[in-house]
Amino acid sequence: MTWYQLRADYPEPDSLISEHPTEQEAVDAKRRYEDPDKS
């Protein structure tokens, strides 16, 4: 099974922010992470 991982360089380099079973969920999470005002 493939999991999509959301990673960032904060607070640590290549930090795992979250994991998602579908690409769409990962994309949505990435959007929320990058722009919290649009949640």
Image: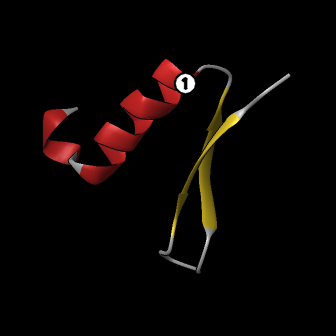
Measuring 23% from the left and 32% from the top, which residue is drawn there? 39
Residue 24 vs residue 6: left or right? left
13 versus 8 height, above or below:
below
Task: Establish if 7 lies above or below 14.
Answer: above
Q: Position of residue 20 (x, y in %)?
A: 63, 29
Query: Would residue 14 appear left or right of 36 to someone viewing this image?
Result: right
- Which residue occupies the extreme left position in the image? 37
- Residue 15 sits in quarter: bottom right
Badge 1 element: helix
For this orientation, the residue located farthest to the bottom is 12
Residue 28 screen position, x and y as percent? 38, 28
Residue under label 1, please give it: 23
Question: Where the N terminus falls, by quadrant?
Answer: top right
| Amino acid identity at mark 1 | Glu
Residue sitting at x 61%, y 19%? 22
Residue 2: x and y in percent read 78, 27
Say few, some or many: other residues with alpha carbon within 10 Å of mark 1 (under 14 / 14 to 19 / 20 or more). Answer: some
Question: Foreground residue, 1 or 17?
Answer: 1
Which residue is pictured at 47% across the width and 75% down the height? 10
Report the side of 16 relative to 25 (left or right).
Answer: right
